[in-house]
Amino acid sequence: MSEVKHKDQKKSLSKIVDDLTRPIKRHYGFTPWILFLIAIMALGIWAYIIQIRDGLGVTAMRDYVSWGLYIASFIFFIATALIGMLISAVLGLIGIKWITPIARIAEMIAIGFAMWAGLIIIFDMGRPDRILNIFLHGRLQSPIVWDITVVTTYVAISLLLYLLPLIPDIPFLKKTMKDQPKWKQKIYEILSFGFKGHTEQYKLIKRLIRIMAILIIPVALAIHTVTSWLFALTLRVGWDSTIFGPYYVTGAFVTGGAAVLIAMFIFSRDFRLKEYITDFHFDKMGKLLVLLMLVYLYFNINEYLVPAYKMKTLDEHHLSGLFTGKFAVMFWTVQLGGLIIPIILMLFKKMRRPIPSLIIGIAVVIGAFFKRYLITIPTLLHPHLPIQNVPAEFSTYWPTAFEWSITMMAVAGAVLIITILAKLFPIMPIWEIAHEEGITNEEINQFVEEKNN
C-alpha cells in the first residue's frame, strides 16, 4: 500500500516539475515578445540621447512644472513594486497558503519596477552625472537621500526574497534541463549555493526567508512614505497634508495588486498553468484588491473633503481645476473607472473570475498611473504666487513625445526583467508546491537523484 502511495506521489512530483519547467524549455512567441520590448526600449534610448544632447527643453517641463511625467512615473513604479512586500511578507508571515503560486510572481514585479524606479529619477535630471553628488555629498536632512537609500535597500531585500526560495528549486533545474545552453546551466550551478536538499538546509532557507520578510516590511513602508514626504514636506496646495504617508502606501498596494492580477492571467494562460493559478486564486486576490481599494477610497475622500470644507482661496482653485476644470475629464475617469466602478464590480463573485479580473486589473493600473499624474501636475500649476509675465507654455503642461518615449522605455524595461526571470526560472516555487501536495523532502531528493542517474 505504501509503495502504491509512493508511486502516486512521485508521479505527482514529476508532473509538477514538468509543468513548471516547461515554459523555460520551450515557449512559443518568446522571441517576438522580447524583440517588441527591445524595440520600445530602443526608441526610448534614442529619445533620451536627444534629451541629454539638447537638455530638458525637449520636454514640456518649465519653471513652474519642474516635476512632470517622469516623477509621476517614479511614484507609479515605486507603488507597483510594493506588492512584493504585501504578498511575500505580510501574507506569508501570517500563514496565508493560497499565495504560494503567486508569491514569486509578486516578487518578480517588485524587482522589475523597483529597479527601473531608480533609473526614472536619473531621466528627470538635466545632468545625470551629478547623481554621484547624492552619495558623495548627500545630507541626512534631505528626503531625497532618504528616498534613494530606501529604494536601493528595497531592491536588495526584494532580490534576496526572490533568490532564497529559488535555491531549493535549482536541483530540479540542474537535473531536468541538461539540454539547455551551458551559460544557463552555469547560472543554475552558481545559484544552487551547494544546496543538497538536507533537512537542515530547508530549515535554514525558511529561517532566512522569514528574516528577510520581516526586514522588508519597514523598508517597504518607508520607501513610499518617504516618497510621499517629498511632496508633503512642502506648503504647496494639494500636497500640504498629513495623510500622504498611509495614502501613498494603500494606493501602492492597490496598484501592485492589480498588476499581480494581470500577471496571474498572463502566466496561467500563456504558460498553461491553470491547474496552479485557479479561479480560487483569482477570487482570493480579487477580494484582497477590493479591501485595498476600499481603504484607498477612504483616503481619496479625505484628500479632497478636508480642503473642500476649509475652501481656502488656493484650495478652491486647485479643486476647481480637478472637479470642473481642465483636469476634470481625467480626474473623474480615474476616480470612477480606476477605483469606484472596480470596487462595485469586484463585490460580485462573477467579476472575480480570470477574464473579468484581467479587465478590471488593467483599468485599475491605468487609473493608478494617471492618478499619480493628477497628484503631481495640477499642484505645480497652482503656485502661491500667480503665474504671470511668462510665455503661455509655462502655465500649461502636457508631456512631449520624448517624455512618453522615455517613460514607455521604463515600462518595457520593467516588463523585460519580469520576462527574463520567467524564462530563466520557474514562476512558482516547485518545492513549496510539492510540500503542499504532501511530498516529503526525502521523496524530492530521491526524485532528483533518479533524474541525475
Image (cartoon, helix red, strand yellow):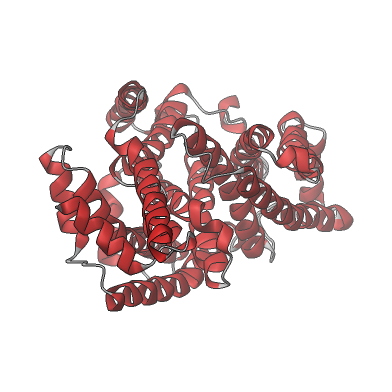
Q: Report the front residue among 355 and 212.
A: 355
Check the image and report above or below for 136 versus 128: below
Q: In the orientation shown, which residue stands out farthest toward the front?
A: 1
On screen, residue 100 above or below 441 = above
Q: Quadrant of residue 248?
A: bottom right
**From the viewer's perspective, is 25 left or right of 387?**
left
Q: Position of residue 362 (x, y in %)?
A: 61, 34
Count of numbered labels shown in the rendering: 0
- Can see residue 90? yes
Give percent across and percent down for residue 251: 64, 53
Can the viewer see residue 148?
no
Provide residue 92's location: percent of width, then percent of height: 52, 67
Q: Residue at x 29, y 79 (%)?
A: 200
In the shown orientation, is residue 162 left or right of residue 300? left
Position in image of residue 188 (x %, y %): 19, 52
| Residue toward you, 375 or 195 | 195
Q: Nearer the viewer, residue 274 or 185?
A: 274
Asked if 86 appears above or below 326 in the picture, the reply is below
Q: Is residue 394 left or right of residue 213?
A: right
Q: Residue at x 44, y 63 (%)?
A: 1
Image quadrant where residue 448 sits = bottom left
Residue 418: which quarter of the image? top left
